[in-house]
Image (cartoon, rainbow, N blue to C red):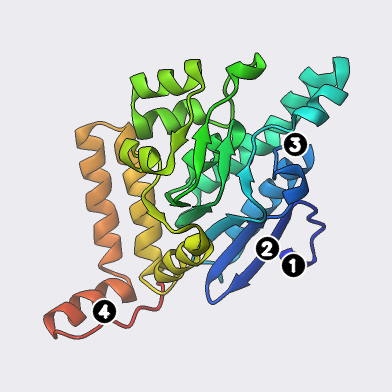
Amino acid sequence: MASIARMELTTINYEVRDGVAHVRLARPEGANAVNPGFSRDLREVMLAIEFDPAVKAVSVTAEGRVFCAGGDLKEFHAAGDGLPQLAADMLVDFHGAIYKMNRIAKPFVAGVNGAAGGAGLSLVSSFDLVVCGESARFTMAYTRAGVTPDGTSTYFLARHIGLRRMLDLTLTNRTLSAAEAEQWGLVNRVVPDDQVDAAAAELAQQFASGPAWALGQAKRLVYAGFESSLETAGELEGAVISAAMATHDGREGIAAFVEKRSPSFEGR
């Protein structure tokens, strides 16, 4: 596969450094809104992350004062009678990118600045961990525009915050502050606005420098266990931890603990 750095991305910047894929939404003049171009770029980036062994973890941030304003309503309006087909086509890529992100055995960390609304909030809810700035704001906004949720929010967001809160956000379009988002379980931690990018990158770097194989499999176990029966979750845990103990990092981590020293992980 050609280097992602040479791919024709128009709405996203992408760079791999020290095991971390740095994904940066890069259309601030359009509030990083979701449109067909962005959706295609996001799916291309996810494919690159999946197949690049140098990538151990991912940091996703955004340029400008808005993380992602949701769907590009100006472009949708301009589509006229062709809008239903445009939306359906766009969601093949947008949803496909989110499916990939969820199934890739690498941790994804988002650093959210400013606002995340509509499809932007849906995207935020699909990341593994989320750091946001103190002034960040979150709103569904779909029904305000006379449409319904997409971006897999009815799957991820509902699981993060619960059914009644999901209905509250969806039907009333209330706006959550950063503190409320943390309290509700939408974000993991809140940091000063000027530290969002650094905090997301630092967390991703921590993962990339750790036992990458174990972290990726742990991610898969948590998602699988959430959807499975007790017995199925237990059987899967048993199989994966046995495999982990056969890896270099599994043996090294145990030895380091016994020998009271810091482990030297190799990501395998």
Mark 4 or mark 1, whichever is nearer to me: 1
Gap in angstroms between the C-alphas marked 2 and 1: 7 Å
**As shown in the figure, which amino acid type bears the numbered disc 3?**
Asn
Of the numbered discs 3 and 2, the one sitting upstream in the chain is: 2
Instruction: Say which label, 2 or 1, has the lower sequence index.
Output: 1
Q: Amino acid at mark 2?
A: Tyr
Secondary structure beneath disc 4? helix
**Residue topped by disc 2:** 14
State whether residue 117 is above or below residue 42. above
128, above or below 225, in the image: below
Q: Closest to the observer: 69 or 106? A: 69
Which is in the foreground here, disc 2 or disc 4? 2
Splitting the image into 4 quarters, where does residue 161 fall? top left
What percent of the width, then of the height, locates residue 145?
66, 18
Q: Which residue is mark 4?
A: 252
Residue at (70, 38) in percent of width and height: 34
In what element is the residue under mark 2?
strand
Mark 1 sits on what residue? 5
> Residue 11's x, y, as percent?
75, 51
Residue 73 image offset from top left, x and y in percent? 75, 28
- Mark 1 or mark 3: name the one nearer the start of the chain: 1
Left or right of 96 in this view: 122? left
Select label 1 or label 3 by which is in front.
Answer: 3
| CB atoms of marks 2 and 1 within 8 Å | yes
Residue 267 in sight here: yes
Marks 1 and 3 sit apart, C-alpha to C-alpha, by 22 Å
Residue 185 to residue 142: above or below? below
Return the disc, 4 or 1, that comes first in the chain's sequence.
Answer: 1
Which kind of residue does numbered mark 1 sit on?
Answer: Ala
